[in-house]
Image (cartoon, rainbow, N blue to C red):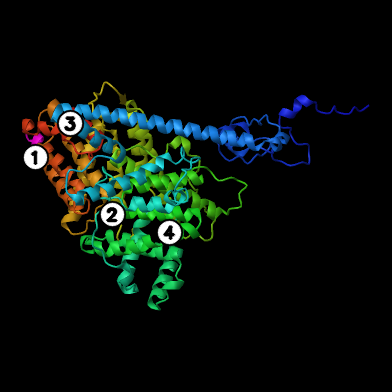
Amino acid sequence: MSSASPAPGPSDSGGTPEPPPGASKTRPIACVRCWKRKQKCDRRLPACTACETQGVECIPRNQDINSLSELSNASVVNYVESLKRRVAELEHNVQSSSRKRARTESYRAASTDGHSPADVGNVCLQEVVSGPPSHASVRNVARDNEDSSVRATMGAIGFLSRSAMAEPPDQSDDLPRKFSLGEIVSGALAIDGRDPSKASPAPHTPTVDGHSLALTRDTTSGYFRRFLECAICLPYLDQAGLMEQYDSVISSNAQSHNGARNPLHVFNVHMALAIGIMTVPDSAHLSMLSAGFHAVAAEQLQIILRSEVSLEHVHCMVMLLLYSLLNSVGGSAWHLLGLTVKTCISLGLHREPDSHSDLTTAELNRRRWLFWSVYSLDRTLSIAMDRPLSIQDDDISVRIPVEEVDSPVSSQETSARLSLSRYLVNYMQVVSSIRTGRRADILLDYSNICHWKDLPPCMERSMFTTLNIADVLQQLHCRALTQLVSPIHRTDADTDLLLGTVHDVEMDAISTCERFIDRCYGQLTQGGYSGNFVDAYDIFQAAVICACLTWRLNQQASGERQPMKVNGTIHKASTLVTAIASRFPALAAFQRVLLTLSMCIVGEKLSGYDMMTPEAFSPIIPRRVQHLIRYTFT
């Protein structure tokens, strides 16, 4: 005997009924979690993708859909009026707070310099609203206005999420353009890259007009091949396709068909040439030529951001970031890195692609390699500059592409390059765990570094004619060991494993840092060295580690390390930093610190003591290095 199901009562109208079999597989409205978070909900049943990914319960909203049609215009108007009143209240609070702070500063300044409170109040109010006033000439005033404009452009990025629903009553049509990706990237390129501790506008520098450059195969092929060999950190690049783009741009340039050229191809070729030029030993004489190629590529950026897919946007920012590490004309590397990582996160590249997506295996792997390339750059720059990581490892679920043994299109050279890329990504994960882990696990971290170092991939030397992979791995090993050295000296009684003691780790760090600096100095004397922004940080930190650990050892056992030998290492590091500081003048602060360390090592501790105070350090000096020096010598 069958019984009919009872009809739903009036009390059920408040909930969202589950659809019967054969009906639509989506809800009519967003779930509770997506609605509260103000994020897009695909309304899938039984759980939306966002809730299913996070592993939380997908709860339907208790709202009668039929009642939505009964909303009156009055209710909408009342809601808008309440928002306007709230905005007016917040603006009043901000103005009151600004006036109160201005009065406080005015009386404080008047008590110190004797100015009238009225005059000082006007100055302080101007400072609160528009930034610090200039006491120089009219030229400096204009300079400060431009400086604040750049800082405002870059600083507004962090408020995008909070201001997404806000629209000012005036200039609303100009707001989307100001917050577009192209404008933000242009703002990062306009920042002076010579000093990473500041966000001042870049000065005007003379460059070669890139449009007047004759792109011929004879004059550019060497630089283009140089870029391909040095692009081991870009495994997502299709080098064969990039070579085809190079041939196409060279051919169209010879035939004067500039109007029919693909903007992305023009960007890739000119950026590859700009980067390739800056990696040659005599790049100092070719910096204007490189800047000219970079300028031509930057002109194509707006068109690319409007016409190409989002993955190409990330690729363009990666290329601009690489150039900024080689030439200060390329803008702020730190801001470009932040924009690149944020774009990757907004595109979901840090998450494993959906298994039901229509992407091919090659497209999926390109997405994965693109993210891991950005991840490697983030770890490299953040660890070198001792700044926060842009994304934590716990928030990453995308996997590293595995090797496809049966792939017919994978050549031996491509397979070897991808194997090296996996090896480098594994290294970045190791140093990331050191950076975010507990300092008590120093020997465990040391064992991970040793395990990584002892299992390098098999690389044919003939694959790289200008790049020595062994030198790259040695620099990475040195960088990892410098992260293990603690500012506060540890004794062997603190931690001890079968792998050795803390003393063994410090001795290995000293010898590795010395070999790294000696190798770079040897290349410099032979005319084959071309350092970049990160190299300067690595060399500086390696020299500081040698000086501080040597001082510690000499305090424990006299004569265990030769001070004069360490001084020679410091002088070599200072010479290398000087060479790189010709492109990044702010790095000259490294030389002053190294000079002070040299004086302390030979016994002139009192003369260098005043320079070891926190106020004496330039903001460009990593905070971790400052702590190590102060704990060691003061």
Q: Residue 564 carries which label?
A: 1
Q: Which of marks 4 and 2 is in front?
A: 4
Q: Which of marks 2 and 3 is in front?
A: 3
Q: Mark 3 points at which residue?
A: 116
Helix, strand, or loop for circle 3? loop
Q: Which residue lies furthest to the bottom in this view?
A: 255
Residue type, mark 1 in image: Met
Q: Determine the CA span between mark 4 and mark 2.
A: 23 Å
Q: Name the residue under label 2.
A: 326
Image quadrant in which the C terminus is located: top left
Image coordinates for residue 258, horizontal then vertical, percent: 41, 73
Question: Which sits in the foreground, 615 or 106?
Answer: 106
Q: Is residue 190 above or below residue 31?
A: below
Question: Which sits in the foreground, 32 or 13?
Answer: 13
Image coordinates for residue 323, horizontal then vertical, percent: 32, 55
Image quadrant in which the N terminus is located: top right
Q: Is residue 600 magenta?
A: yes
Q: Determine the CA span between mark 1 and mark 4.
A: 55 Å
Question: Which sits in the foreground, 388 or 139?
Answer: 139
Q: Earlier in the sequence, mark 4 or mark 2?
A: 4
Q: Is residue 296 above or below residue 183?
A: below
Location of residue 461 by image quarter: bottom left
Residue at 15% across, 35% down: 616
Residue type, mark 3 in image: Ser
The residue segment tinted magenta is 598-603
Residue type, mark 4 in image: Gln
Residue at 85% across, 28% down: 5
Helix, strand, or loop for circle 4? helix
Q: Determine the CA span between mark 2 and mark 3.
A: 50 Å
